[in-house]
Amino acid sequence: QKEVEQDPGPLSVPEGAIVSLNCTYSNSAFQYFMWYRQYSRKGPELLMYTYSSGNKEDGRFTAQVDKSSKYISLFIRDSQPSDSATYLCAMSQGGSNYKLTFGKGTLLTVNP
Amino acid sequence: DVKVTQSSRYLVKRTGEKVFLECVQDMDHENMFWYRQDPGLGLRLIYFSYDVKMKEKGDIPEGYSVSREKKERFSLILESASTNQTSMYLCASRGGWAGDSPLHFGNGTRLTVT
């Protein structure tokens, strides 16, 4: 079983739709969870950052972590064409462990 | 604002050449990383440096070496480039440990080895 699994898509939605992006993981030691957004021909940029279980909201974006199910989600409300990008989940154990484990990314296209 | 700069956006090299990829960060970060990104394989860590002259192997270090002579600069070296090293290379930096602060990425160098 891979440490982090992410559906690669592609996912295509109309403008204004609610988008749900998901990752599952197998390592119960993960405590820090991130979502990165990567536009074409650019490096990934941090979008959301959460610690342990729960929800975090930032504008149209909500990150959700369910550690009991080893499942994380990113919701995008009122999606815009500018949200078209690849979304990567990432997670780490924290502490002195430097390693960040990434999902392979989901390609999202929001059609006007 | 955080800035990680990779010296080249695109590079084309021949098989067997020695290739240098340069990365500079302006945040005084201790930790710097080199990843490669390939379709279907995602991001894979090549090398990591936690201080000047200090380095650790990542998941796929074979065929690569690194150099960190100054805190702000981290170089990836392909000793003898091969076609299977054609990829997007991403440099990143971070101020603290994995749980405390996120990675900041450069915009990548797309390397083609012919």
Image (tube, helix red, strand yellow):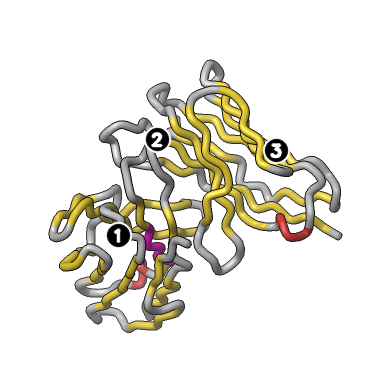
* Secondary-structure class at tag 2: strand
How far is mark 3 from mark 2, CA to CA?
Answer: 21 Å
Q: Is residue B67 above or below residue A52?
A: below
Q: At which x and y percent is residue B17?
A: 25, 81
Residue B92 in view (yes/no) = yes
Q: At which x and y percent is residue A112?
A: 86, 60
Q: Chain of mark 2?
A: A
Q: Is residue A41 left or right of residue B96?
A: right
Q: Nearer the viewer, residue B28 or B43?
A: B28
Q: Assess whether residue A28 is covered by the magenta stretch.
A: no
Q: At which x and y percent is residue B113?
A: 37, 77
How far is mark 2 from mark 1, CA to CA?
Answer: 22 Å
Residue drawn 45% across and 79% down? B10
Q: Number of callouts in the render?
A: 3
Q: Residues within 10 Å of mark 1 (few under 14, many from 20)?
A: few
Q: Is residue A26 left or right of residue A108?
A: left
Q: Residue furthest left?
A: B53
Q: Are marks 1 and 3 in contact (CB under 8 Å)?
A: no
Q: Assess whether residue B89 is covered by the magenta stretch.
A: yes
Residue that mark 1 sits on: B28
Q: Earlier in the sequence, mark 3 or mark 2?
A: 3
The circle on residue A75 is 3
How far is mark 1 from mark 3, CA to CA?
Answer: 33 Å
Q: Residues within 10 Å of mark 2 (few under 14, many from 20)?
A: many
Residue extent of the magenta highlight: B88-92
* Secondary-structure class at tag 1: loop
The circle on residue A15 is none
Residue B67 in view (yes/no) = no
Residue that mark 2 sits on: A92
Q: Chain of mark 3?
A: A
Q: At which x and y percent is residue A92?
A: 40, 35
